[in-house]
Image (cartoon, rainbow, N blue to C red):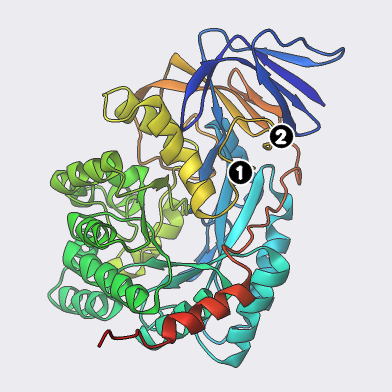
Amino acid sequence: MTVLIKGGTVVNAEQSIRADVLCQDGIITAVGEGLDAPGGATVVDAGGQYVMPGGIDPHTHMQLPFMGTVTTEDFYTGTAAGLAGGTTMIIDFAIPNPQQNVMETYMQWREWAEKSVADYSFHVAITWWDETVHKDMETLVRDHGVNSFKHFMAYKGAIMADDEILVNSFSRALELGAIVTVHAENGELVFRLQKALYEKGITGPEGHPLSRPPEVEGEAANRAIRIAEVLRVPLYIVHNSCRQSLEAITRARNEGQRVFGEVLAGHLLVDDSVYRDKNFEVAAAHVMSPPFRSKENQEALWRGLQSGNLQTTATDHCCFCADQKAMGKDDFRLIPNGTAGIENRMEVLWHHGVGTGRLTMNEFVKVTSTNAAQIFNIYPRKGSVSVGADADIVVWDPAASKTISAKTHHQKVDYNIFEGMTVTGCASHTISRGRVVYADGKLDVERGAGRYVDRPPFAPYYDALTIQAKLAEPVPVAR
């Protein structure tokens, strides 16, 4: 299939230029002015619009078994909703239960994802430790294109990784040339606070943010950073929601440590007043971890994104409908944690970022696509409108306007955390692997068209072993 995008302004992370873009057989083959369309090509008129790399959402949970239920969004519906909003790739999570074989888990997720309509990859969570996990991490890096491992510092009694697991897994990741990621919340503190609140009679959704104050996130972020500092392994901290975790990241980066931070669109725009809504369904719909925070924290997160101390934006797309959230009607600890957002991430960030002057267009591309591609080692194949890159492109109409609503979104969930928000700036066309899959409000997707994306290690693992050995050598002392 051949697609020619004509008359637009190509916006990459580093520059913006007036140019046409030619896509053939799923690859960008030419970028320049005055390109001609070969016979039979699909021509997209991008006059007055911006032609940008398709969005990469580095944090989603499709078809996730969690807290006694399964998310309503599977890989087919979830990736389709992403395409409707300009997101052309996701990095999801394969999460073993305690003692569950890691390779078995990974292969199960690969099977579930075969229905994807857009490209995808996986972080693999390390939730327990023995020699089989040590071995499986190498197999994943060497044979399956996995270069990132996730660690939940929360969810005590389930998937929480204690310090011993963190040290073992972080050390192994360094040997393999992989990056480690963490969900930073002090699981022991959360457990104790939840118990204390419940015993005091606080059983509704308002107990959720009270049991997970910013301090428990800040402590865990700093602990993960310092463990990574000692072991000299790069670290990526997901869904930073508060000033305390941002300050820990900023301090580490100022000290020269290789630490990256992610922020969710929701945490930038939704505040903690939602948990005090008298309607249980509304309050419970917003229960996610870390919870939405005060407006003060939102402003800090925007500054972190503007300054470059937070590099990526994501959604933690994890859908549960009202009947599932009702599992915690009498006990907030049982409300499944998760909200949606993959369809609206780029729209709300454009409106509230570029539209307000907080972000330039090029910075928008960085935080929605390019930085994630670079951090997870798939750039310039992804995250760039350039010759040789995958033809994953969004044509962006800066004048288009819409009001976000669960009644009209493509996401398979009965609530939208941005409900009623009117945004200016939306995708008019989305091109996935060189095929127009979204145009003028209509999806045209093919089940299984998405492909798994290998992400190579940052250095061959045998080189990393040599590097680690050299780092362990004593430093000569001048006499």
Residue visible at 51% across and 14% down in the picture: 49
Q: Locate residue 209: give its quadrant.
A: bottom left
**Residue 51: horizontal and vertical position, in percent?**
55, 22
- Marks 1,2: beta carbons within 8 A: yes
In the picture of the structure, the residue carrying the numbered disc 2 is 445
Q: Residue furthest right?
A: 39
Q: Nearer the viewer, residue 207 or 280?
A: 207
Residue visible at 87% across and 12% down in the picture: 39
**Residue 417: horizontal and vertical position, in percent?**
35, 41
Question: How packed is label 1: few (under 14 Cα within 10 Å), some, or many (20 or more)?
Answer: many
Q: Residue furthest front?
A: 479
Q: Quadrant of the C terminus?
A: bottom left
Give, as a three-letter code, the residue at label 1.
Thr
Q: CA distance from mark 1 to mark 2?
A: 10 Å
**Residue 115: horizontal and vertical position, in percent?**
72, 50
Q: Locate residue 8: give its quadrant.
A: top right
Left or right of 460? Residue 448 is: right
Residue 405 visible in image: no
Residue visible at 64% across and 74% down in the picture: 105
Give, as a three-letter code, the residue at label 2.
Val
Left or right of 351? Residue 87 is: right
Q: Which is more N-terminal, label 2 or label 1?
A: 1
In the picture of the structure, the residue carrying the numbered disc 1 is 79
Secondary element at tag 2:
loop
Residue visible at 61% across and 43% down in the picture: 79
Q: Nearer the viewer, residue 247 or 67?
A: 247
Secondary element at tag 1:
helix
Above or below residue 183? Residue 276 is above
Q: Nearer the viewer, residue 251 or 44?
A: 251
Above or below residue 203? Residue 242 is above
Above or below residue 376? Residue 215 is below
Above or below residue 177? Residue 420 is above
